[in-house]
C-alpha cells in the first residue's frame, strides 16, 4: 500500500469582519440570530448553520416541581424557539438578518 497524502484546511467566518478566512466565500451571514439560555439546571447546545434555521439541543434536570427532560432538538421558527422546556428561555431581542441569496 502506498502512503496517502491528505490536506485539510480550516476556514472561519467572523461576523464582525463579514468574511471567511483564510479565503473568502459568499453567504457568510446566518439569516437569523435566534438564541436561548438556561434558567435552571440542564444542558444547552445551540447551532446556527449558514443556510438552515438555528436549533438548540436541550435537556433539563429535575428542578422544583418539574421533571427531568431528555435531550430534544428545538428549531427556531424564524423569530423564536417555540415550546422550549422549563429550563430554557429565549434571549430577548433576537436580531433578524437578511437570508443569504441562493
Image: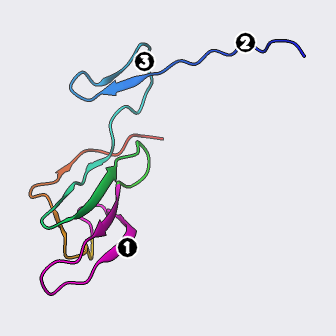
In the rendered image, which quarter is residue 39 located in? bottom left
Residue shown at the point (26%, 70%) measured from the top left? 60
Q: Earlier in the sequence, mark 2 or mark 3?
A: 2
Q: Which residue is mark 2?
A: 5
How far across and how far down the image is residue 47, in percent?
Answer: 35, 49
Q: Which residue is mark 3?
A: 24
Between residues 23 and 87, which one lies in front from this camera angle? 87
- Which label is found at residue 70? 1
Callout 3 secondary element: loop
Q: Which residues are magenta?
A: 55-81
Residue 78 inside the magenta-drawn segment: yes
Question: Is 81 rendered above or below residue 1?
Answer: below
- Toward the right, the furthest residue is 1
Residue shown at the point (33%, 42%) measured from the top left? 30
Residue shown at the point (35%, 47%) measured from the top left? 48
User: Few, some or many C-alpha atoms within 10 Å of disc 3 (few <14, some 14-19, many ≥20)?
Assistant: few
Residue shown at the point (38%, 40%) measured from the top left? 100
Question: Is 33 rendered above or below residue 6?
Answer: below
Judge left or right: residue 86 versus residue 93.
right
User: Few, some or many C-alpha atoms within 10 Å of disc 2 (few <14, some 14-19, many ≥20)?
Assistant: few
Amino acid at each position: 500500500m502506498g502512503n496517502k497524502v491528505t490536506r485539510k484546511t480550516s476556514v472561519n467566518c467572523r461576523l464582525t469582519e463579514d468574511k471567511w478566512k483564510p479565503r473568502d466565500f459568499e453567504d457568510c451571514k446566518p439569516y437569523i440570530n435566534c438564541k436561548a439560555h438556561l434558567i435552571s439546571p440542564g444542558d444547552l447546545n445551540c447551532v446556527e448553520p449558514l443556510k438552515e434555521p438555528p436549533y438548540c439541543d436541550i435537556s433539563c434536570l429535575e428542578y422544583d416541581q418539574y421533571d427531568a427532560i431528555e435531550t430534544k432538538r428545538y428549531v427556531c421558527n424564524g423569530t423564536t424557539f417555540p415550546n422550549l422546556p422549563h429550563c430554557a428561555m429565549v434571549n430577548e431581542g433576537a436580531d433578524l438578518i437578511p437570508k443569504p441569496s441562493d
